[in-house]
Amino acid sequence: MDKRDILVIGASAGGLAALTRLFGGMPEDCMPTVFVVLHISPSARSMLPRLLNRVEWLTAFHPTDGEPIRPGHIHLAPPDHHLLVHRDRVLVRRGPRENRTRPAVDPLFRSAGIAFGSRVVGVVLTGMLDDGTSGLRAIHRCGGVCIVQDPEEAEWPGMPESAIARAPIDHVLPVDAMPALLCRLAAEPAPPGPPVPFDIAEEAHIAEQEFTTVSDDTQAIGSPTTLSCPECGGGLSEIRDGPALRFRCQVGHAFSPDSMEEAQAESMEKALWVALRTHEDRVELFNRMTRHARERNQLNLAAQWESQMQEARRNADLLRQVLSKPEVKRANEQKKG
């Protein structure tokens, strides 16, 4: 009988330290098949395999697309690629970003739930925002076990707190207490799992596509809205999954509520900076036109240009005040972090 020996883990900010602690506490004779998504910069050269191999538990590596799954190994998502599982193989795809990131946790968790059902144990560790919440719900609905790091000890509690609030969680515990639980679960027989829900299969299929085209797939699992996708400008559908609310466009970009709010805030800030730059340019233009009119003794025209210059200056000052507000500064700092 199959065991609960498929371990999928998602982490973001603070994730390397948490993974090191987790893997460092695992007994040598506990050898599940592990898949990990850690949010990393798309342009970074990943040192994650080397760093995790120093722990000297299971061998960690970046798989290639279509490579057979290696039992008793740690499969790591490469930079700028989703890591997915499909039957007995690994898929490494540059599909649409989810929650503004690639790799993302949710696509891995969904694919694992479909491929392995009740054999899957999903773990969400430290991180900002809420990637992983939808994926844990998918694992639960496919019969798997859901575990979350205690937010009280997480370096960044956002991802654990979101999962606890919106997904059915079986265990909430500190990282140092996880190895004993994971090893016990890996030795347990996996019970029969339910059929794969239609909506989970549809979303997993979207992530598997290397290059997506506009389709009606999202409308089969959600309701159209008047919202536009911050990534591509396309229309968004609203997907309801219990208490969890998400959005996905026809190309496939997906957003949790937190990532959607962050994307909109970033778009708004960019628009404000463009508007500020435009008004500053107008101040410079009107100033030049004022001087030119005065040199030609066209005083009425000069007064008109000066009036427009003053209006542009007032608009620029107003935009500077908006951009200096604490909430705008905080959003910008979080984006840079």
Image (spheres, rainbow, N blue to C red):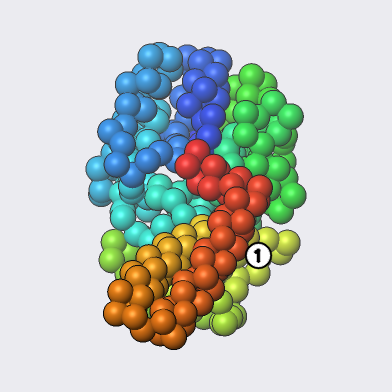
Give the residue displayed 41% in from the left and 57% down from the top. 97
The image shows residue 41, relative to residue 91, as above or below, that is: above
Q: Quadrant of residue 250?
A: bottom left
Give the residue displayed 33% in from the left and 48% down from the top. 81
The image shows residue 112, relative to residue 291, as above or below, that is: above
Relative image position of residue 93 (x, y in whole percent): 31, 54
Q: Is residue 142 visible?
A: no
Q: Quadrant of residue 73?
A: top left
User: Callout 1, which amino acid?
Assistant: Leu
Q: Secondary structure at mark 1?
A: strand
User: 145 or 223, which lies in front?
Assistant: 223
Left/right placement of residue 136 relative to residue 171 reads left
User: 7 or 319, which lies in front?
Assistant: 319
Give the residue displayed 59% in from the left and 42% down from the top. 128
Relative image position of residue 237 (x, y in whole percent): 55, 76
Give the residue displayed 32% in from the left and 26% down from the top. 47
Numbered circles on residues, count = 1
Left/right placement of residue 151 relative to residue 302 reads right
User: 208 or 289, which lies in front?
Assistant: 289
Q: Which residue is mark 1?
A: 245
Left/right placement of residue 78 relative to residue 312 reads left
At label 1, counting other C-alpha atoms closer than 10 Å, the crowd grade (few under 14, some 14-19, many 20 or more) is some
User: 188 or 67, which lies in front?
Assistant: 67
Q: Residue furthest front?
A: 297
The image shows residue 110, relative to residue 302, as above or below, that is: above
Q: Quadrant of residue 247?
A: bottom right
